[in-house]
Amino acid sequence: MQQQQFILGSSPNDGLAIPPTLQAESIETVYSESSSTLLKEPASASDIEGLVDEISDRVGTLKIGPGGKTRFYGPTSTFNLREMPSSDSYEPDQSSPTDHYGSEEEIPADVEDHLLDLYFTWQDPSFHVVDRHIYEEAKEKWKNREKTPFYSEALRNAMCALGSAFESRYHPTVITFPKTLVEFFADRAKSILETELDSPCVATIQAMVILSSHEVGNGKDARGWLYSGSALRLAFDLALHLDMSSYVSAGMISAADADLRRTVFWTAYIVDHQLGFHLGRPFRTSMEDVTVEKPRQKAGSRGHCGWTPCEPSSSASHDSGLLDIKDAISQQLVSLCELMGPCGYILYGTSSISKEILQALNAKIVAELHKWKATLPPILQIDLDDVTSPYPPHVLLLQPWISKSQLQPQPPRGPGYTHAREMCIQSAIAISKILNMYESRYTLRRINVQAVSITSSAILFLLFAAVSNYPSHSQGNISLYLTTCFRALDEFTLSWKSAQRAKDLLVGLQRQWDLRTRSNKLPQQADGMLYRPQKRLRTSSELHRMAAVSHDPAL
C-alpha cells in the first residue's frame, strides 16, 4: 500500500499555511529511483541547488499519511527531507483486550456506555478534549479494521476510568475486585498506552490528557504532570499546533477533523498549564510557532442544548435549554493561562527579581484578571445569589480564582496588602457560595477533579481569616464558609483520593496556625489585625512550600 505524503515548507520561502500542490510518490518508489539516479547519472547544477534548498530548509515539514495521521518534522530534523523513508507506520492495534491485560473479562456494552455518559457529563465539559460523535464514528471504523487517528483502546479505557470516579467503587455484575472500577480501567489504559506510543495518533494525546486528570485526582502529581507534558509535546509532534485551514480548503482533511485537532491541542495546553500552576512549576513550552486558531464559541451552537445531566432528578433537566458552551469555556481558559504565564515565570519561578518589578507585574496581572472576569460573556456569568438558574457545572467551576499574586511585597503600592487580603478572602467566600450552588443542583459526589484544588485554596484563606480575626467578617460567618469547604472536600474523597490528602494537610495546618496565634498572644492592632507583616517578599523556598496549596488557577 502506498503511503501518501503531503510536504509543507520544502524551501526557505515556503509558508506553513500554504497547501501542498503535489502529491509525493510512495516512499519505496522515491527511495529506489533516488538510488538509481545517484548511481547512473551525473547531478546537474539545478539538482545540486535543489538538494541545498532541502538541506537548508528552515521552515519544517508536515506529512499527512493514510487515515489522516500527521507528523511534523522541524527544520533541523533529518526526517525533514521529503525522500527520507518514515521509520514508523500507522497500524491500528486490533489485538484482543486480553492481549494487554490478561484474562480479565471484557466490560458489557451497557456498563461502558454508562461510564462514558458520566465522563462526558462531569469531566469533559471543563477540559473538553473528546468529540463524542467523532469518537463513536472512529470506533466503528476501528471495529471494521479501518485506519483512524481518532480512536484507540487507551482512550476508551481512560474515559471509562474517569467516568468510574463518579460511580460506585465496584460494580455488582462486573468482577474487578480487589481493584476498583477506576483502578481497573486506568491500569488497562496505561498498559495499552505504552504500546500505542510506538505509533501515536490524536487519540493517544487525548488518552494522556485524560489520564493526567486521573493521576492528579488520585494524588499522583508527578505522573499526572508527566502525562500532561507528554501530551503537549506529542501534540507538537503530530502537528496539532499548525493551522490546517488551507488543507481543509484543499480537501485533504475535513473541517470536523481540523476542529478536533485544534480542540485537542488547546486542551492539552490548558491542562498542562493549570497543572503547572497547581504544582508551582512555570510553563516551559514555547508557543511562538503555534499557528492553529484558538478555541472560540461558535454562533451556531448557542441555540443547542449541548449539556444534560445523566440523571433526570437533577435540577438541570433535559429540557432546561443549557447551551453547548464547551468552546467558550476553553477560550476563556486559554486566555487565563496566558494572563498568568508571566506570574509563573517571575513571581514564583525565581527569587532574583527586584521588588519594583514584582510590584509592577503584580498590579498588571491583578488588573488583567479583573478585566478577564468582568468581560466574560453573559453565558459564562453567574449570580451568587441566584438559587434557581440551572447553571451548568463547568460554568460554576470557571468562576473561582485565588492567587497569592494579590499579596504585595513590602513596601506596598496601590491599595496595599489589606486590600489584597480582602480580595483573597472575598474570593474564598465566593467559592464557598459556589460550592453550595453546585451541591443544590448536582450534589458534590460528582464534580470535576479541579474542584479539589479550588476548594483547598479557599480553605487556606478562610483559615487565615479565622485565626487572624479579620475585622471585615464575623467569626461566625467565616466558620460557616470554612465548614462548607471542609465538608465539600470530605465529599470529594469519594471520587478523588487527592481530596483526602488535601483535607489532612489543611486540618493539620489549621491546628498549627491556631496554636501559633494562641501561644503568641499578640495584642490586636487598631485595624483588627493580630500582627502586621514584617516582610512581604517571600523567599523562593517559602513560595514553593506554599504554592501547591495556595496558588491555583483552579477554574
Image (spheres, rainbow, N blue to C red):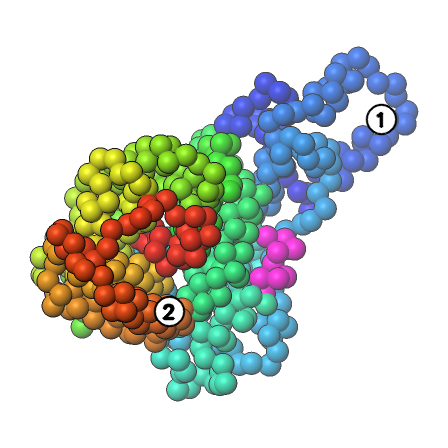
Asked which quadrant contains residue 370, the reply is: top left
Q: The residue tagged with tag 2: helix, strand or loop?
A: helix
The reply to whether residue 423 is visible in this rendering is no
Residue 536 % position (x, y): 33, 45
Spatial CA distance of label 1 from label 2 is 70 Å
Question: What residue would you read off at disc 2?
Answer: 505
Q: Earlier in the sequence, mark 1 or mark 2?
A: 1
Q: Which residues are magenta?
A: 192-200
Front position among marks 1 and 2: 2
Question: What residue would you read off at disc 1?
Answer: 37
Q: Is residue 350 magenta?
A: no
Query: Pointer 2: residues within 10 angstroms few (<14), some, or many (20+)?
Result: few
* In the image: residue 386, left or right of residue 322: left
Q: Is residue 434 above or below residue 515?
A: above
Residue 35 % position (x, y): 84, 32
Q: Nearer the viewer, residue 185 or 256?
A: 185
Residue 93 % position (x, y): 61, 61
Amino acid on which disc 2 is placed: Leu
Amino acid on which disc 1 is placed: Thr
Q: Is residue 104 above or below residue 347?
A: below
* In the image: residue 415, left or right of residue 170: left
State the residue at coordinates (28%, 45%): 406
State the residue at coordinates (77%, 18%): 47
Q: Nearer the viewer, residue 105 or 522?
A: 522
Q: Residue furthest top?
A: 45
Query: Pointer 1: residues within 10 angstroms few (<14), some, or many (20+)?
Result: few
State the residue at coordinates (41%, 51%): 543
Q: Mark number for residue 151?
A: none
